[in-house]
């Protein structure tokens, strides 16, 4: 792996999102501490379930759905809430940081029990759900989501029996080296992931676009060579979450692009992408807390 030099930074984050990124290991631990009480509300083995969300929450839904199926816990589909189909499920998991997103509220009208995961009590999502998991300790001031999303995924991964102490240690190690950011000066990033890590790749791309207006794309690893590799070139980066599939590293090397490939859990590696997104925003004098055209929640007028 080659690494471009990163612009200088301060050790104390000047933005809300910078501080929220650093809160992640502690929030992940708290979620796992609460898991014994919350686990009965989450999907049980053998259920056929759906997980819904919008934006970042949808990407966390995709990651969890892939993990749950891979663990043999039951068929699990993930949908952007606006595309939720008329289909029967044993349970729906609705993820919404704000609890006010219109598409999520509308999708919760389905005829299946709904458990909501949110950061804010007394909201339409919390009140409409049959059960609510409140992660208020992971709420955020920034429009850009970081700690709530990864804390939700930590809780869901823990519910599948994963041991995550090592992942938390990796994230702490990343945060202890805030200047160690790979391919920091690249003009373009392609984020790749296989299985559940594809959801992480989607989220990494979104963070860079939201906070820093960087050109990013995200793909399943095996799909990357079916066209997207055509944009790979010197000065651009291909960032792989998880182990690269056979032959991928060689194909990327032939393009002259920088390959980012490390032995980090994809969720811990996402922390590096978050840090880089904030760094790039600051270098460009952008406000990483308030990306242009975005609000904390999308609330639509009723039809």
Image: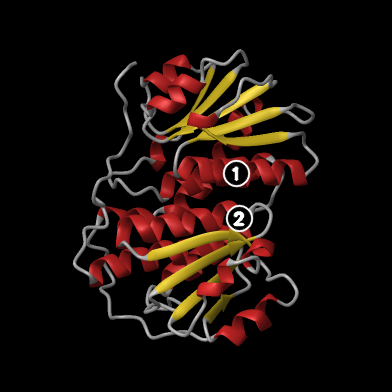
| Number of marks | 2
Q: Is residue 243 left or right of residue 211?
A: right
Q: Quadrant of residue 119?
A: top left
Quadrant placement of the C terminus: top left
Specify which label sits upstream in the sequence, 1 or 2: 1
- Compared across the picture, whether 105 is left or right of 268 comes to left
Residue 230 image offset from top left, x and y in percent:
55, 73
Please, what secondary structure does the residue beneath circle 2 have? helix
- Asked which colour scheme the image uses, the reply is secondary structure
- Residue 240 located left or right of residue 216: right
The residue that disc 2 covers is 198
Residue at horizontal 48 percent and vertical 62 percent from the top: 217
Residue at (31%, 69%) from the top-left corner? Answer: 279
Nearer the observer, 11 or 279: 279
Q: Position of residue 104 (x, y in %)?
A: 46, 27
Dot 1, how many residues are within 10 Å of its Cα: few (below 14), some (14-19), or many (20+)? many
Does residue 16 lie above or below 172 as drawn?
above
Crowd around label 2: few <14 · some 14–19 · many ≥20 (10 Å): many
Residue position for label 1: 62
Q: Looking at the image, do the residues carrying marks 1 and 2 touch, with CB atoms under 8 Å apart?
A: yes
Residue 39 versus residue 217 in the image, above or below: above
């Amino acid at each position: 792996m080659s690494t471009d030099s990163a612009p200088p930074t301060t050790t104390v984050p000047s933005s809300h999102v910078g501080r929220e990124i650093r809160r992640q290991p502690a929030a992940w631990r708290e979620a796992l501490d609460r898991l014994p009480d919350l686990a009965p509300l989450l999907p049980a083995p053998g259920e056929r379930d759906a997980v819904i969300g919008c934006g970042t929450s949808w990407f966390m839904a995709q990651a969890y759905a892939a993990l749950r199926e891979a663990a043999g816990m039951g068929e699990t589909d993930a949908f952007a809430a606006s595309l939720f189909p008329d289909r029967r499920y044993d349970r729906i998991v609705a993820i919404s940081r704000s609890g006010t997103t219109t598409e999520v509220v509308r999708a919760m009208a389905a005829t299946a029990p709904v458990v909501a995961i949110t950061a804010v009590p007394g909201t339409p999502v919390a009140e409409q759900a049959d059960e609510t998991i409140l992660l208020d300790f992971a709420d955020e001031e920034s429009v850009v989501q970081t700690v709530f999303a990864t804390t939700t995924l930590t809780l869901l991964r823990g519910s599948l029996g994963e041991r995550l102490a090592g992942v938390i240690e990796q994230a702490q190690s990343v945060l202890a080296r805030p200047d160690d950011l790979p391919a920091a000066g690249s003009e373009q990033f392609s984020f790749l992931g296989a299985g559940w890590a594809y959801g992480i790749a989607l989220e990494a791309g979104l963070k860079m676009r939201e906070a820093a207006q960087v050109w990013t794309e995200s793909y399943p690893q095996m799909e990357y060579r079916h066209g997207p590799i055509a944009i790979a070139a010197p000065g651009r980066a291909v960032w792989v979450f998880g182990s690269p599939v056979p032959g991928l590293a060689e194909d990327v090397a032939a393009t002259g692009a920088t390959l980012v490939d490390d032995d980090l859990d994809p969720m811990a590696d996402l922390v590096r992408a978050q840090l880089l997104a904030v760094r790039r925003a600051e270098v460009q004098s952008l406000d990483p807390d308030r990306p242009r055209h975005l609000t904390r929640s999308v609330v639509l007028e009723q039809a």
